[in-house]
Every structure is written in C-alpha cells, then in structure tokens.
Image: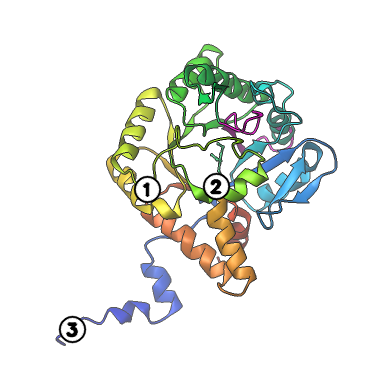
C-alpha cells in the first residue's frame, strides 16, 4: 500500500468523472421566467437582460412552444401592465396582462406548469410591492390585494402561484382565499426567503418596477441574516406554503443548504437577473466562458440543496443537456 491516497484515479477521464459525479443537472430542474407586455406583435430584447425578451400575448404561442419543445416543464410569468396606479388595479384585473397570458399559454400547452409571480410592484405607480400610505408600505391592506391577485391568476388557469412581495401573512391570506373559491388544489410556491438584494437590478428595468422612493428593506430580508431565514421558512410552512424559495441563489448558497437540511420541504432557488447578467456580460467581453460558467453556477445551486431552479438560463441549459446526453 502506498503511503498516500490517489484521488486522481477517479478524475482521469470523462467517463469515470461522470460516474462519480454527485450532482447532475436535468431539464426537469428548471423553471423559465418570461415577461409579458401589452400590445401586439412584440418580441423585444430586454436591454439589461441579454437574450431575454418582452413578449406580447399573441407571441406567446410561439415563444412558449420553443420552451415546451425543449422539454422544460414550467414557466413563471411576469406582467407589465398598460397602466399603473396607487392600488395596483392591473394586478388583479380579470383582463390583466398576466391573466390574459395565462389563458393564452394554457390553451395551447395544457400540460405545461404555468406559475405566476404574485406581487404588486409592477402594477403600483410608486413601484413598491404593497399599497403605500404616507410613505409607508402597508401590510394588512396589501395582503388583501395579493390574495385577490392570486385568485385572479388561479381563475385564469394558473397551475401554481408564487408570492414574491414579502408582506407578512400573505401565504395564509392567499391560501384562505384560494380555498374559499374552490382552488384548494393550487399549490403556493412562496418566496419565503427573499433578501433585499442588489442583484435584482436588471429585473427591475425588465419589469419596470424599481421603487420610486425609498427601497425594499422594510419588507425584504437583510443579507446578513441566517436565523431569520429559518424563521421565515417556519412561518411560511405554518401558513400553508407547498414549496419554499430562496432568492437570490448564488450569493445565498449557505442559506439554501441550511434550509434543505432543516426542513423536509421542496426547495426552489431563484438564480436572479443580476446573477445571470454577470455571466452574460463577462462572457460577452471574453472574460468567462459562458456555457462552462452557467453549468458551474447552476450545479452549485443544486449541490447546495435546491430541488428546482428558476433561471433565465433554462433554455440554454435544456439545449446543453440535450446535446450532451
Ligand atoms: C417582484 C420580483 C422581483 C424579482 C422577482 N419578483 C424584484 C424585486 O423584488 O425587486 C427579481 C427577479 C430577478 O432579479 O431575476 N417583487
């Protein structure tokens, strides 16, 4: 017996490396975020989010068709309304942008999991995730509107709702309203652990929802907090969440791991716009290899414990997996 261990035996070629690889990415791991805008015939690249598009409802058949053909099982829809107001009317309008988009997508692809982001920030004139009075984001009034929003999404045919607002009690409120209206079969994927992050930057221009005053720190979490994340998850489980989410993903891998180890719940992680844009732009300038960086980043998120990943790379990943399997 030699007096040291030869770990390199298991790294010597691609075949053995793939046999011993502990974390493999599958197409079924990914959920693809998509943005819907008013108007017709629109497929417009989003300036701060390279290779991602704003689509009008009539373009969704083709755009979502491509996603379905790649084998992706789920999308999450974000809407930009025609008009914004103080009470976020567009968020819960039966003919709102997301409601129309859901009906259109489900009519063509009934098998696809259509998730809707439930929040008010795209729909409020001030850009906050809840109603505002005297410069304060109101909690209890806001969750009523969030409940109405989730219900309108379910009525349009959404398969799952995903509240991203970070108001207190919103999961319980949404569960109550859905159950009362015969939607007790619709799961809630809660953005339970959503940090007040700088990495949402590109999304805010994509969804035109940057707050007009102040910031989101009175409702989103402080990046320094780990135990608070565990408390948020406990609260959301008690309120009836079916899937827990951590967001962002790459800069919170420790939190993902800890939640996975502490709770027996399906766990989602959102690889957010800034985390995506960093790779895209660095690759564009020749600083990183895009595909290798994408795979390494998403593998890390899954290795940390995510059961599913929301990512703008979903289509690229699906293509890569198809080419390499
Ligand atoms: C809406 C919402 C945001 C994101 C998802 N839902 C932005 C925010 O809270 O400011 C971010 C997604 C991303 O950055 O990719 N509340």
Question: Which quarter of the rendered image does ligand 1 occupy?
Answer: top right
Labels 1 and 2: the sequence-earlier one: 2
Label disc, if present, on residue 200 of the rendered structure: 2
- Foreground disc of the pair 1, 2: 2
Label disc, if present, on residue 256 of the rendered structure: 1
Q: Are marks 1 and 3 in contact (CB under 8 Å)?
A: no
Q: Please say if 208 is above or below 186.
A: below
Residue at the spot of label 3: 4
Q: Left or right: 196 with respect to 274?
A: left
Labels 2 and 3: the sequence-earlier one: 3
Give the extent of the magenta segment. 106-128
In whole angstroms, how far apart are the C-alphas of marks 2 and 3? 47 Å
Is residue 11 found inside the magenta-colored segment of the image?
A: no
- Foreground disc of the pair 1, 3: 1
| Figure coloring | rainbow
Task: Find numbered disc 1 in the image and state the secondary structure of the residue it sits on.
Answer: helix
Please indicate, yes or no, whether residue 205 appears anywhere in the rendered image: yes
Is residue 113 found inside the magenta-colored segment of the image?
A: yes
């Amino acid at each position: 017996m030699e007096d040291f261990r030869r770990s390199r035996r298991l790294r010597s070629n691609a075949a053995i490396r793939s046999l011993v690889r502990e974390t493999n990415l599958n197409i079924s791991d990914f959920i693809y975020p998509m943005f819907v805008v008013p108007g017709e015939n629109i497929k417009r690249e989003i300036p701060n989010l390279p290779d991602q598009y704003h689509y009008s409802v009539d373009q969704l058949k083709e755009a979502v068709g491509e996603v379905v053909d790649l084998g992706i099982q789920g999308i999450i829809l974000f809407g930009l309304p025609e008009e914004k107001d103080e009470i976020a009317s567009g968020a819960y309008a039966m003919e709102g942008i997301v409601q129309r988009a859901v009906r259109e997508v489900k009519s063509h692809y009934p098998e696809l999991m259509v998730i809707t982001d439930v929040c008010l920030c795209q729909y409020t004139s001030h850009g906050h995730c809840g109603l505002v009075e005297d410069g304060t984001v109101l909690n209890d009034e806001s969750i009523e509107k969030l409940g109405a929003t989730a219900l309108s999404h379910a009525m349009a045919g959404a398969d799952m709702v995903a509240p991203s607002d970070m108001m207190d009690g919103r999961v319980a409120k949404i569960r109550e309203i859905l159950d009362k209206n015969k939607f007790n079969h619709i799961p809630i994927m809660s953005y339970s652990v959503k940090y007040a992050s700088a990495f949402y930057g590109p999304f805010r221009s994509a969804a035109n929802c940057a707050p007009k005053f102040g910031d989101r720190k009175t409702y989103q979490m402080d990046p320094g907090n780990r135990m608070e994340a565990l408390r948020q998850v406990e609260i959301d489980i008690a309120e009836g969440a079916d899937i827990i989410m951590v967001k962002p993903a790459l800069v919170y891998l420790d939190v993902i791991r800890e939640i996975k180890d502490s709770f027996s719940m399906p766990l989602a992680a959102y690889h957010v716009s800034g985390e995506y844009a960093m790779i895209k732009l660095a690759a564009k300038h020749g600083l990183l290899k895009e595909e290798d960086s994408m795979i390494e980043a998403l593998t890390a998120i899954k290795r940390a414990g995510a059961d599913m990943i929301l990512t703008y790379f979903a289509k690229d990943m699906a293509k890569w997996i198809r080419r390499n399997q």
